Image (tube, grey):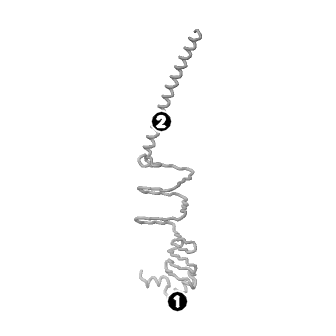
Amino acid sequence: MDNKKLIELYLGNSKDNPIDKITKALKDVCYYNETEVGLYHPTNSSLIKIRDNGVIDIFVSTNQGLRIDPSTHSINFFSNNEKHTSGNVNYWIEENMDLDIKQKFLIKASDIIIDSLRSTINSKSLDVNISKENINLGGLTVKSIEDSLTDIKNDIIDIQAKDNTIENRLNNLESMLNQILSNLNGG
């Protein structure tokens, strides 16, 4: 659609000065105070607005855009859907990062690395399905943990066997002592 048709669509076939009509429409919309500046698209309501308090709004429709707010030192994104496509994304967070997710949080990656001084997971239900080859706990793989547990189990069996051997020897010694005492007592 060319500009002339867009103007006719917005203004109709009026013989009024189109600039006056657009200016009046902008004032009627009340998007700007006298000292605020910005751009407003008359047919699709997209806007860029620099407010008197320093806030910068960039919106394409209701609740779809962003606000840069110097008073809170924040950039706020408003959207029903948000998509990022990038080769690399790096975040440097000075203090806290909170995620409040009402439904599902899905991470798909070839590698996930969490490098933390302290990590805590609080969950009503936690299901973890990880293949033996890939889990690494405290520097040990599941295979090495299983091997260590098997070694400990074998050590326990050896200790029990030695304990049984010592117990048998003590029983034999007790029997021999009882026999000697019996012989000494004239039996």
Q: Compared with residue 140, is residue 116 higher up or lower down, i.e. above or below?
A: below
Instruction: Pick the residue in front: 67 or 176.
Output: 176
Q: Earlier in the sequence, mark 1 or mark 2?
A: 1
Q: Is residue 42 visible?
A: no
Image quarter of residue 146:
top left
Instruction: Pick the residue in front: 34 or 68.
Output: 68
Which residue is painted at 51% across and 72% down in the image? 66
Alpha-carbon span between mark 1 and mark 2: 90 Å
Percent x, y of residue 81: 49, 66
Amino acid type of the residue tagged 2 in the rendering = Lys
Amino acid type of the residue tagged 1 in the rendering = Asp
Percent x, y of residue 73: 55, 72
Percent x, y of residue 67: 53, 73
For label 2, the SS is helix
For label 1, the SS is helix
Which residue is painted at 48% across and 82% down in the image? 9
Check residue 177 in the rendering and tell me which mark sits there, or answer none.
Answer: none
Q: Quadrant of the C terminus?
A: top right
Q: Which residue is mark 1?
A: 20
Q: Is residue 141 visible?
A: yes
Query: Which of pointers 1 and 2 indicates the residue nearer the eye?
Result: 2
Q: Residue furthest right?
A: 185
Q: Compared with residue 23, is residue 175 higher up or lower down, i.e. above or below?
A: above
Q: Which residue is mark 2?
A: 153
